[in-house]
Image (cartoon, rainbow, N blue to C red):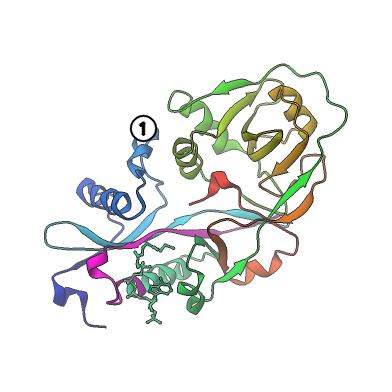
Amino acid sequence: MADPGDRGLSFRQDYFGDPAGRAALVDLLQDIFSIDVSLLDQFGGPDPTSMPFGYFNDAGVCVANFSAFSMPVVINGRSVKAAGFQSGAVRPGWRGRGLYRDLMRRAFAWTDTQGFELGLLLTEKPALYEPYGFRTIPQHCFVGKPPSVLPEQPPAATLSLPGDGEAIKSLLLERTPVSRHFAVTKQMEMFLLNACFDPDIRLSRLAAEDAIVAWKLDGSCLRLLDVVGKSMPSLASIIASLGVAPDRIETCFPADLLDWAGAATPYQGYTVLMMRGAAADDITKPVMLSPMAEF
Ligand SMILES: CC(C)(COP(=O)(O)OP(=O)(O)OC[C@H]1O[C@@H](n2cnc3c(N)ncnc32)[C@H](O)[C@@H]1OP(=O)(O)O)[C@@H](O)C(=O)NCCC(=O)NCCS
């Protein structure tokens, strides 16, 4: 492709130290995806591991961006150094000129030099990433009946954002992965953003076991989105603490640590989960990325 500099564009990498640069990315994501990532400012700002790659015009407008960030995961009990890719967008007037190809190549090369053994992304356009070694990993949620016997539990406390942000952040930093089969081990910003974006997500803190449950009630179906704790409570304890009486349970993550077994059921989201790297071959059981880690 022609040098983007020929068109008056400047390439910038790792530019979040410049508030104007970050504000220009906030504008790009607002314009293209109608999301406001500046909501993160009330929780301490963007993910410090984020590595943005972008093109800017002379007026400081971000016309294209693609970012990598650290998103360590556990796969079959093994900790894997993984990078997530997000915030991929090109302004309409600049599309079809190879800007995104250039940014993808730079971002993938950077994560390779940083020793990430796995790349992850969620996309509606898998064909865009297949040439770079990404493949679709089918996702499954886990469905079944609630346990028949529930223990006595004190009621959970309802949490809300931004007020309870600090308490949620500190538990996110100390959490144990929600599954040993596949789960994110450390990621704070996406949990907070996703909780802000979707008003139907409820956050409850279990009193007996120090854990926060992200959940939804859809009729009589209890949908568990994530459980953040230093240890994992059983599903029976969670249901008893939430004070609900569902007749169907769906977990949006592998349920191997919940002392309960649900049937793996193909999950159709509007995006697909893609992975790149040999570590993806270690995924041998049905998995789902918690919606609270979606990016
Ligand atoms: C998708 C998008 C980022 C592409 O940007 P772009 O600068 O036009 O892309 P490029 O010109 O660099 O093209 C890169 C490659 O992607 C391919 N491509 C472009 N749009 C595509 C699409 N919608 N689906 C599949 N492939 C696509 C191109 O054919 C090109 O392939 P090549 O390298 O084999 O020639 C841009 O259209 C956009 O911002 N769309 C809206 C937001 C979005 O969907 N972002 C991706 C989130 S996962």
Q: Name the residue: 39% across, 70% down.
A: 104
**Residue at numbered disc 1:** 42
Location of residue 242 with respect to 188 vertically, above or below: above
| Residue 57 within the magenta-colored segment of the rendering | no
Q: Name the residue: 48% across, 79% down.
A: 131
Q: Name the residue: 36% across, 46% down.
A: 35
Q: Which residue is more in the foreground, 151 or 124?
A: 124
Looking at this view, name the residue that lies furthest to the right: 149
Residue 245, quarter of picture = top right
* Mark 1 residue type: Gln
Which class describes the residues within 10 Å of circle 1: few (<14), some (14-19), or many (20+)? few
In the picture, measured across the screen, residue 112 lies left or right of residue 210, that is left
Q: Name the residue: 56% across, 54% down.
A: 72
| Residue 89 within the magenta-colored segment of the rendering | yes
Question: Percent from the top left, x then y, of residue 93?
Answer: 22, 67
Looking at this view, name the residue that lies furthest to the front: 219
Question: Percent from the top left, x then y, of residue 208?
Answer: 72, 21
Looking at this view, name the residue that lies furthest to the top: 154
Q: Is residue 133 visible?
A: yes
Q: Is residue 186 visible?
A: no
Question: Percent from the top left, x then y, of residue 1?
Answer: 27, 83
Q: Which residues are magenta?
A: 77-101
In the picture, measured across the screen, residue 210 lies left or right of residue 28, that is right
Q: Which residue is more in the foreground, 128 or 104?
A: 128
Figure quadrant, ligand 1: bottom left
Question: Percent from the top left, x then y, of residue 168?
Answer: 53, 30
Total tally of numbered discs in the picture: 1
